[in-house]
Image: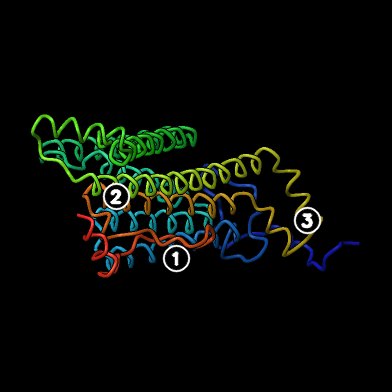
């Protein structure tokens, strides 16, 4: 007798979108809940992307963040929409929308990371290179139709963007890396170079070290969630037959909790959203606008946001200049 009340899983059936034409079919059984969605849990978990994407766009408009991040949120929504359509239909064109939008959005974040404070010529060349790369990945993936190629390309691009952003964060915010310690200040003063007051430099160093600590917490949390989702997704694939048996043993709705690909959507969606928020905050720091913006993240389970700092807070900070 089951420990919790449950409903037996209905059998898989023929769906509205049959036949399946995608090169991938995940561990969730097809068309067991409705004829209109092949993988209902894998479909609905993509609503998180849409909700967080809309929230991010509204935040960008409300707080005046750089346009590139608003574009990134639109890409984030497209990723979720493509995945929603793919898991609903299991059609190959929708699979391409799902997977390639991940590449395109990551290329956007790559542009945001590498183009900052560069010359117009550099930005144009970078844009041409990334566009060409995205086109190459699109055509070659369509030719190969090998999911491993897409997964490796996405992983490599994501790693490059993350490493570049981490490096930029350390160089910009850590006092020893940007040569803003008291020893550095005195050395510049001896050379007759313009320097901040001791009090102002101390204030900025303490402020930026605190920011750096919080950023690393956000990065660590986001990476842990993202990689945790990746691990669950792989376990779901590897032990699919066992997981399917467990789901049928415990029945609905509890079996939904064992839909590993659905957890992949939730966890990678959260991790990707955290990355964009981190990117926004880092961009304001690079623009020396730390006093104008701050991170709102009261609890780890809250959805973080970079918001404008009140004029009162700005005024108190300016007194230290």
Q: Can residue 304 be seen in this view?
A: yes
Badge number at residue 248: 3
- Viewer-nearest of discs 2 and 1: 2
Q: Is residue 39 left or right of residue 138?
A: right
Q: Residues within 10 Å of mark 1 (few under 14, many from 20)?
A: few
For the point 76% across and 44% down, the residue is: 242
The image shows residue 143, relative to residue 94, as above or below, that is above
Q: Name the residue under label 2.
A: 203
Mark carried by residue 51:
1
47 to the left or right of 118: right
Q: Write the residue at 42% across / 54% down.
A: 273
Chain-order first, disc 2 or disc 1: 1
Name the residue at 25% across, 31% down.
183
Q: In this view, does 69 lie above or below 161?
A: below
Q: Which of marks 3 and 2 is nearer the N terminus?
A: 2
* Residue at image point 59% right, 52% down: 263
Looking at the image, is mark 3 or mark 1 nearer the viewer?
A: 1
In this view, 85 is above or below 261? below
Work out how far the residue at label 3 is from the one at label 1, CA to CA, in angstroms. 31 Å
Q: Which of marks 1 and 3 precedes in the sequence?
A: 1
């Amino acid at each position: 007798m089951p420990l919790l009340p449950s409903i037996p899983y209905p059998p898989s059936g023929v769906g509205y979108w049959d036949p399946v034409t995608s090169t991938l079919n995940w561990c969730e059984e097809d068309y067991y809940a409705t004829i209109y969605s092949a993988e209902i849990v894998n479909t609905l978990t993509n609503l998180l992307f849409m909700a967080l994407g809309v929230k991010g766009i509204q935040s960008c408009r409300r707080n005046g963040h750089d346009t590139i991040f608003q574009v990134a949120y639109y890409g984030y929504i497209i990723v979720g929409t493509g995945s929603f359509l793919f898991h609903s239909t299991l059609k190959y064109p929708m699979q391409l929308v799902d997977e390639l939008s991940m590449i395109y959005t990551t290329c956007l974040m790559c542009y945001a990371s590498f183009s900052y404070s560069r010359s117009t010529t550099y930005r144009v060349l970078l844009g041409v290179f990334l566009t060409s790369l995205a086109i190459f990945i699109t055509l070659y993936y369509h030719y190969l139709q090998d999911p491993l190629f897409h997964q490796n390309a996405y992983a490599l691009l994501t790693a490059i963007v993350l490493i570049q952003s981490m490096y930029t964060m350390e160089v910009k915010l850590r006092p020893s890396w940007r040569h803003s310690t008291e020893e550095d200040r005195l050395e510049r003063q001896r050379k007759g170079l313009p320097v901040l007051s001791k009090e102002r430099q101390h204030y900025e160093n303490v402020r930026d070290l605190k920011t750096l600590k919080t950023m690393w917490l956000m990065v660590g949390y986001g990476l842990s969630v993202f990689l945790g989702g990746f691990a669950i997704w792989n376990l779901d694939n590897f032990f699919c037959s066992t997981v399917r048996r467990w789901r049928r043993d415990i029945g609905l709705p509890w079996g939904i909790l064992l839909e590993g690909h659905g957890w992949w959507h939730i966890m990678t969606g959260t991790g990707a959203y955290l990355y964009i928020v981190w990117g926004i905050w880092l961009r304001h720091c690079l623009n020396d606008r730390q006093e104008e913006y701050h991170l709102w993240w009261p609890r780890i389970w809250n959805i973080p946001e970079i918001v404008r700092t009140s004029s009162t807070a700005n005024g108190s900070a300016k007194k230290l200049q």
